Amino acid sequence: MKIAVCVSHVPDTETKVKIGSDGKTIDTSGVNYILNPYDEFAVEEALKIREKDGGEVVAVSLGEDANKETLRKALAMGIDKAVLLKDEHERDSYAVAKGIAEYLKSYEPDLIFVGKQSIDYDNLQVGGLIAEFLGLPSVSVAVKLEYADGKLKAEREIEGAHEHVEVTLPCVVAAQRGLNEPRYPSLKGIMQAKKKPIEEIEAAQAESRVKVLGMKKPPEKQPGKIVGEGVDAVPELVRLLREEAKVI
Ligand SMILES: Cc1cc2nc3c(=O)[nH]c(=O)nc-3n(C[C@H](O)[C@H](O)[C@H](O)COP(=O)(O)OP(=O)(O)OC[C@H]3O[C@@H](n4cnc5c(N)ncnc54)[C@H](O)[C@@H]3O)c2cc1C
């Protein structure tokens, strides 16, 4: 089984995002980058399938040289091969997915994993677009997978229920939190990952269709209001909820 996992290089969740001087991009100075948390579930699931059924897992990341750091984390977790699809230029989700799909056409994986979303720009589009470009079925928000006889049974997390679906391979699966418990890289894995080569390929060109016009911070939260204490405060609280907040 050939499995490809798409991994995104994203700012650490602790990052206090600052908008760059151009007003359109994030100021990346001092930002610590990590392997996108949803992609950790994707890597883990790919490794579990390989451990059970054999095969190869390749991690693919499209972006700048710095993405190698994230590919090394995937190598340390235990993937077999890492590929950087190089491009220094800004791309929208369409162009990111197109670049990845062009590479996957030559790799011909049986299974493609993505994370549910990339926590940098939160577009939730790349997995579906890759599936469309490759003409493959796609399963989103997967929380449980069972693979047998060339078919994949998946449980999807939907509002108030879990939906059970079945797809034939090859297909694209987007990993949701709960799919598994990602392993920590072992010290041996970290040391080995430092020496493993990362294949570098120029990403296939693709024109972005969405242009970022600007970014701005959401309005500051209003400070909380203490209306009193105990039961005496209830009438005033109800009045404020009704007349000011207009929620009741
Ligand atoms: C060099 C570069 C600079 C960029 N600069 C900007 C910018 O300044 N402003 C802006 O708005 N956008 C920018 N983008 C676009 C933005 O980073 C992409 O949209 C992002 O890569 C994917 O985020 P998303 O929200 O579209 O992904 P989602 O659709 O939410 O991601 C879902 C899944 O797709 C996979 N995936 C997503 N991205 C990648 C990737 N790059 N490589 C491998 N797998 C991936 C992961 O598995 C991820 O979990 C830039 C992109 C690049 C490559």
Image (cartoon, rainbow, N blue to C red):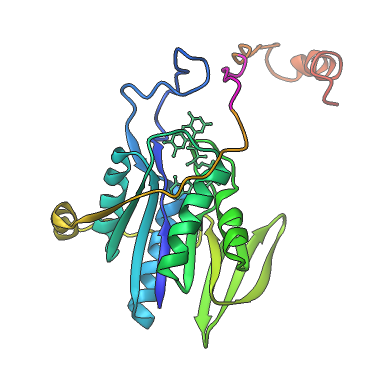
Bounds of the magenta span?
A: 212-219
Compared with 156, 246 (above or below) is above
Q: Which residue of the protein is positioned furthest toward the bottom in this rendering?
A: 149
> Between residues 61 and 234, which one lies in front from this camera angle?
61
Residue shown at 48% from the left, 70% from the top? 111
Check residue 115 for magenta coloring: no
Give the x, y percent position of residue 195. Answer: 13, 55
Give the x, y percent position of residue 75. Answer: 26, 58
> Between residues 199 and 43, which one lies in front from this camera angle?
199
Compared with 57, 61 (above or below) is above
Q: Quadrant of residue 48?
A: bottom left
Q: Quadrant of residue 46?
A: bottom left
Residue shown at 34% from the left, 36% from the top? 33
Compared with 124, 101 (above or below) is below
Q: Quadrant of residue 10?
A: top left
Give the x, y percent position of residue 99. Answer: 47, 50
Residue shown at 55% from the left, 65% from the top? 172
Check residue 218 for magenta coloring: yes
| Res 42 seen here | no
Q: Is residue 161 left or right of residue 235?
A: left
Count up the numbered dots.
Answer: 0
Provide the major secondary structure of the magenta segment.
loop
Q: Quadrant of the N terminus?
A: bottom left
Q: Is residue 74 left or right of residue 25?
A: left
